[in-house]
Image (spheres, rainbow, N blue to C red):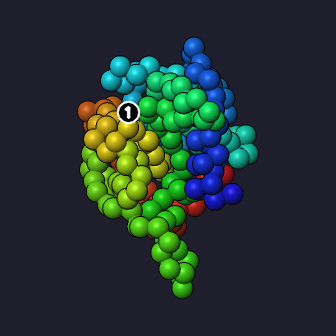
Amino acid sequence: MSALSAAAVLFLVFAAAPPAAAPARDCGSKGRLTILTHYWAGPSYSGLALTRESGQCARRSARREDTIVGFIYGSCTPPSGEGGCSPPLEIQNWPACKRNLHSYKPPPGVPQAIPPPKLTTVRGVPAATFEGDPGRLEVYTGRTTVVIFASGDTQARAVADNLQKAPTSRHGVTASQPLPPPARGALEGKLRCRR
């Protein structure tokens, strides 16, 4: 499964799930610390409570870099006749070995089907926005790609400025510290996943 189709599946799981009274912990976040640093915006952000925390593991091991962990803030009610809706704010944490800037480059000889990401910088590290997808911001830090889905570009940038180490992580930074630079080879798609 490609990184982008996995993102779509994860989004559908989150969008269709009813809000939980407390974070739903599974996968690498069962109180264990994982090797991948997870970032979140805290227990609430700008009046939006953390309503769901979830993970998707390829091999069901928190000791490997195959965990995608997401944090959803707020809830939504689907319009009448619709099957789902997007939450007001979602932060996904992907292994940089599986999702990175190189993921958006077509194979040699294949034309670029979608506009390439627009590069920017957030808290001293590379980041990207995507034409036609307002409110989506990817931040490349350490061995983690943090994907933010917000109501617009301004909110996504504000959330990125407040990213901090989640309780499921051993290492990380506070919201007032610069983010660690991407691991060598991460942006080029050359970073190997740890086992």
Looking at the image, residue 81 sits to the left or right of residue 130; the answer is right
Q: Is residue 143 above or below residue 62?
A: below
Q: Residue at the spot x=40%, y=22% of the render?
A: 48
What residue occupies the far bottom of the structure in this picture? 109
Q: Which residue is mark 1?
A: 164
Q: Is residue 129 above or below residue 159?
A: below
Q: Residue at the spot x=59%, y=19% of the render?
A: 20
State the residue in front, 136 or 62: 136
State the residue in front, 43 or 166: 43
Looking at the image, residue 37 sits to the left or right of residue 10; the answer is left
- The crowd level at tag 1 (other Cα within 10 Å; few <14, some 14-19, many 20+) is many
Circle count:
1
Q: What amino acid type should be assigned to the residue bearing mark 1? A: Gln
**Quarter the N terminus occupies:** bottom right
What residue occupies the far top of the structure in this picture? 21
- Label 1, secondary structure: give it: strand
Residue 179, position as x, y percentages in the image: 33, 44
Q: Residue at the spot x=71%, y=47% of the render?
A: 58
- Residue 67, by quadrant, is top right
- Residue 162, by quadrant, is top left
Q: Residue at the spot x=33%, y=62% of the render?
A: 118
Q: Can residue 84 be seen in the rendering of this structure?
A: yes
Residue 113, position as x, y percentages in the image: 50, 72
- Residue 84, by quadrant, is top right
Residue 4, position as x, y percentages in the image: 58, 56
Residue 18, position as x, y percentages in the image: 62, 23
Q: Is residue 192 above or below residue 50?
A: below
What residue occupies the far right of the structure in this picture? 59
Q: Can residue 141 be seen in the rendering of this structure?
A: no
State the residue in front, 128 or 82: 82
